[in-house]
Image (cartoon, grey):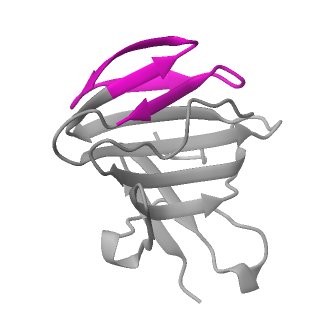
Amino acid sequence: MRPSIVILAGLVLAHSAAAEGPATLETGVRSSDAATSETHDWGRMLTYFAGTSYSSTDALAAVATIHPGMEIHPPHVHSEEEYLMVLEGTGTWSVQGQEFAAKAGDLLYAAPWDEHGISNTGDVPLKFVVVKWNPNPVSPMAQPVGEE
């Protein structure tokens, strides 16, 4: 069975089929047509990958679109590290109890257990990339012999 694959915001991910055992990520591309789409009251989540990789668990690579005046959830905390990057629209970031303007091109890094969130306070949909994960206690892979 061929692995399904993802490239998202400069990160390369691939997920082997569940029947082949635990997820193993490999270099490759997964198109938006192959991603899982969920529609919610607040907007839409397009999930390219959710699972485990060589060095992470609870990994997620997705694109969310939030309707004007909405948020996915209130500011929150979790054990995963996370990046959020606004692609389109405007809104409000919430970071450790402080709020400030969010706009296309902004990138948030949230460390484990740091409160964070984003809401769409603009007039058009707010679209952002989300990548989050828990690290596994592994050593970096050695470079294959003969490769540079």
Identify which residue, 35 or 138, lies in the foreground.
Answer: 35
Position above or below: 48 against 95: below
Position above or below: 138 against 95: below
Q: Residue furthest right?
A: 137
Residue 20 lies, in percent from the top left, at 74, 82
- The answer to whether 110 appears left or right of 42 in the picture is right
Q: Quadrant of residue 81?
A: top right
Residue 36 lies, in percent from the top left, at 47, 73
- The answer to whether 143 appears left or right of 107 in the picture is right
Position above or below: 139 against 21: above
The region drawn magenta spans 92-119
Identify which residue, 3 or 112, lies in the foreground.
Answer: 112
> Residue, x 56% and y 12% (percent of image)?
97
> Residue, x 78% and y 76% (percent of image)?
21
> Residue, x 71% and y 51% (percent of image)?
58
State which quarter of the image contains the N terminus: bottom right
- Is residue 114 found inside the magenta-colored segment of the image? yes
- Number of dots carrying numbers: 0
**Residue 142 in sight in this render:** no
Q: Residue furthest bottom?
A: 1
- The answer to whether 82 appears left or right of 78 in the picture is left
- Is residue 65 found inside the magenta-colored segment of the image? no
Residue 48 lies, in percent from the top left, at 46, 63
> Residue, x 16% and y 40% (percent of image)?
123
Q: Residue furthest front?
A: 69
**Residue 130 in sight in this render:** yes
Residue 126 lies, in percent from the top left, at 27, 43
Q: Residue furthest left?
A: 123
- The answer to whether 35 appears left or right of 146 in the picture is left
Q: Magenta part mainly helix, strand or loop?
A: strand
